[in-house]
């Protein structure tokens, strides 16, 4: 009675590998993100060593409607800046 069960297990393993492989391929082929990254410069350097949530408290001190670099009126919902604006690779 063990033989049929073994066959089933093999089948499931194969399905698992094929589905996993397809998913991986899909993710690897996804287009590169186009949202502007947070620059690495004097204004932003200090945020690179901070936890994201910590850093995000400071963004709007400059990026606010009266600030130096206001966000566009049609800017997407803006909590969690660093979810969309990733740090640049260094
Ligand atoms: C001290 C002021 C200041 C703070 C604080 C600040 N920024 Fe900026 N940011 C600027 C200025 C000035 C520019 C435009 C010039 C530049 O590219 O640096 C800018 C530009 C940007 C840009 C656009 C880059 C591009 O390629 O157009 C992004 C994205 C950005 N900031 C994200 C953030 C995020 C996220 C935070 C919080 C973690 C943050 N900024 C905090 C001053 C600031
Ligand atoms: C849901 C995703 C998302 C979140 C969250 C978000 N942004 Fe953006 N942001 C965008 C998109 C999309 C654009 C316009 C396309 C681009 O990146 O140039 C943009 C544009 C900007 C720009 C102008 C960049 C340029 O080159 O024109 C700045 C500065 C900016 N965002 C700062 C912030 C800050 C600061 C926060 C947090 C308070 C924030 N963003 C949160 C998606 C997001």
Image (cartoon, helix red, strand yellow):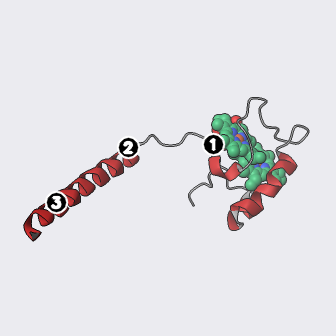
Secondary structure of residue under mark 2 = helix
Q: Which residue is mark 3?
A: 8
- Distance from mark 2 CB to nearest ligand 2 atom below 8 Å: no
Q: Nearer the viewer, residue 54 or 5?
A: 5
The first of marks 3 and 1 along the sequence is 3
Residue at mark 2 to residue at mark 3: CA–CA distance: 32 Å
**Are the residues flagged by discs 3 and 1 in contact, CB closer than 8 Å?**
no
Residue at mark 3 to residue at mark 1: CA–CA distance: 49 Å
Q: Nearer the viewer, residue 65 or 8?
A: 8
For the question of whether residue 73 can be seen, the reply is yes
Which circle, 1 or 2, is nearer the viewer?
2
Residue at image position (70%, 60%) is: 52
Q: Give residue 58's mark.
A: none
Which circle, 3 or 1, is nearer the viewer?
3
The first of marks 1 and 2 along the sequence is 2
The single residue placed furthest to the bottom in the displayed view is 2
Residue at image position (22%, 60%) is: 13
- Distance from mark 1 CB to nearest ligand 2 atom below 8 Å: yes
Picture quarter containing residue 58?
bottom right
Query: Is 38 placed above or below 55 here?
Result: above
Q: Residue 32's x, y, as percent? A: 48, 43
Q: In the figure, is residue 67 to the left or right of 47?
A: right
Q: Which residue is mark 2?
A: 29
Name the quarter where the C terminus is drawn. Answer: bottom right
Q: Which residue is mark 1?
A: 36
């Amino acid at each position: 009675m063990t033989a049929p069960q073994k066959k089933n297990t093999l089948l499931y393993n194969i399905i698992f590998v094929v589905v996993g492989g397809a998913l991986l391929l899909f993710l690897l082929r996804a287009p590169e993100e186009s949202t502007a990254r947070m620059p690495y410069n004097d204004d932003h350097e200090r945020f690179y060593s901070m936890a994201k949530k910590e850093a995000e408290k400071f963004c709007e001190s400059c990026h606010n409607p009266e600030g130096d670099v206001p966000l566009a009126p049609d800017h997407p919902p803006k909590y969690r800046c660093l979810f969309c604006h990733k740090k640049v690779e260094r």
